[in-house]
Image: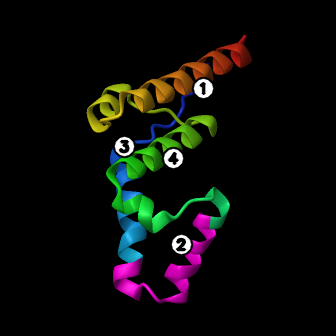
Amino acid sequence: MGFERRLLPMEDVIEGFRCMEEIGALFGEDSTFFTGMVEGIDRKMNIDLLAYLKDPRSREAMYAEVLIQGIMSGRTVDMEEIEASFKNKKMVETIRRYLRKAGEALEGEQE
């Protein structure tokens, strides 16, 4: 009886970031909730979240980070969907590598 990894759809990753931006629009960018969220992410990841969200390349890097963290936490991704969504092919290959390593580790656990 095999273990099935739950899919992390690219659409959910994109929507998650859209929702973060929407908090600023709904609550106000000076809201403690929004500024606290942004400051927490900035500090934890050593980035400037709002600047990264405005830059398409940085935004794509954040998408890749979420997908890789998901893979490392036991999720899986659809590589065809990833290939269609990313302009940066090096990021696609990095995600593919993590997915392959996770699959190999899962196989090793099942033996």
What crowding class fits label 4: few (fewer than 14 Cα within 10 Å), some (14-19), or many (20 or more)?
A: some
**Range shown magenta:** 24-42
| Lower sequence index among marks 3 and 4 | 3
Distance between the Cα atoms at labels 1 and 4? Answer: 22 Å
Residue under circle 4? 66
Distance between the Cα atoms at labels 3 and 4? Answer: 10 Å
Q: Nearer the viewer, residue 71 or 97?
A: 97
Distance between the Cα atoms at labels 2 and 1? Answer: 36 Å
Residue under circle 3? 10
Which marked residue is nearer to the observer: mark 4 or mark 2? 2
Tell me the element at label 1.
Answer: loop
What crowding class fits label 2: few (fewer than 14 Cα within 10 Å), some (14-19), or many (20 or more)?
A: many
Indicate the position of residue 56 as horizontal and vertical percent values. Answer: 32, 51
Tell me the element at label 2.
Answer: helix
**Quarter of the image containing the C terminus?**
top right
On the question of residue 2 being in view, the answer is no
Distance between the Cα atoms at labels 4 and 2? Answer: 16 Å
Name above or below for residue 107 compared with residue 37. above
What kind of residue is marked 2? Val
Name above or below for residue 34 compared with residue 111. below
What kind of residue is marked 1? Phe
Quadrant of the image occupied by residue 29: bottom left
Residue under circle 1? 3
